[in-house]
Every structure is written in C-alpha cells, then in structure tokens.
Image: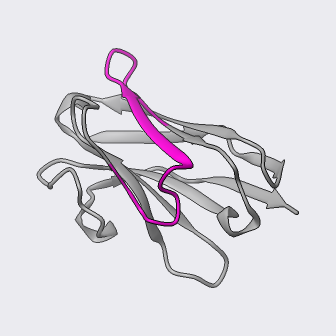
Amino acid sequence: QVQLLESGGGLVQAGDSLRLSCAASGRAFLLYIMGWFRQAPGKEREFVGSINWSGGSTYYADSVKGRFTISRDNAKNTVYLQMTALNVEDTAVYYCAAGRSIRPDTRESGKYDHWGQGTQVTVSS
C-alpha cells in the first residue's frame, strides 16, 4: 500500500513557474510507475505525464510537452512536476498517482492503483 501526498500548488500568474511535489509513504516506491493527472472544473481528469521506476523515461501529454518536467528521487520517495510557462488553461487540481503493474507510458487514470488528494494550481492572466 502506498499513500501519496501532493504539495506545492498555489496561485500564480501566466508565464510563471511552479513545482509540485508528491511524497509517497509505504513500501516499494521503486516498484511504482508514477503519474501526474489534472482535473479542471467541469472537465474529466486528464493525463499530464508519467515516469518509470528509474526516472530515465518520461512521457507527457501534448498540451504540456516542452513546458512540464517530471522527475523522481527514489531516495526521498518523492516525485516532482516542474511546470514552466504556465497559462490559464493549466488551472486545475493536480493529482499524483502510483501504478504497480502498468506500462510506464500509461495514460488511463483507471489503471493507476493509488492517488493523492490533489493540490490546486490556479493561473491568472
């Protein structure tokens, strides 16, 4: 069992940067594919990106590619989402997720086993 806790959200202006963190407690963090998702008001939860166990492979939604970077520190049981050039369309609740027996490029939220409570990111124009 893995418990996930996101932090780092807030209110920023368009063009700003923000880094989200997701701390995992529990066992075998290394065995999990980690993903970031987001959900804007009135919209479905959508894939942002994911990272494999070593951090050597990352995958992104087209909407954030080149602006967002996912990384992980297995010694700290933490995964990060560095967001740059934020725009108002990035406003959403951001969730981290952990999947045990999935491909590292998995984009379907239903395939992830564990979820954090989410952190709000609001980008003002």
Image coordinates for residue 16, horizontal then vertical, percent: 77, 44
Taking the spot 47% from the left edge, 50% from the top edge, the residue there is: 116
- Coordinates of residue 40 in the picture (x, y in percent): 63, 73
View extreme (top): residue:
75
Q: Quadrant of the C terminus?
A: bottom right
On screen, residue 36 versus residue 92, left or right, reads left
Q: Is residue 37 above or below residue 52?
A: below
Looking at the picture, how far across and down is residue 104, in whole percent?
Answer: 20, 50
In the rendered image, residue 105 lying in the magenta stretch gets the answer no
**Quick one: 38 or 4, which is closer to the camera?**
38
What is the image's colouring?
A: one colour
Q: Is residue 8 left or right of residue 103?
A: right
Question: On the picture, is 61 further left or further right than 41?
Answer: left
In the foreground, 50 or 97: 50
- The span shown in magenta is 59-80
Q: Position of residue 84 (x, y in %)?
A: 65, 44
Q: Residue at x 69, y 69 (%)?
A: 89
Q: Residue furthest bottom?
A: 42
- Reply above or below: 69 against 104: above
Q: Report the side of 21 relative to 76 (left or right).
A: right
Q: Could you say which is closer to the camera, residue 110 or residue 125?
A: 125
Quarter of the image that includes the N terminus: top left
Residue 29 position (above or below residue 102)? above
Q: Residue furthest left?
A: 101
Q: In the picture, residue 91 is in which quadrant?
A: bottom right
Is 75 magenta? The answer is: yes
What residue do we see at 23% from left, 40% from top?
A: 52
Image quadrant of residue 18? top right
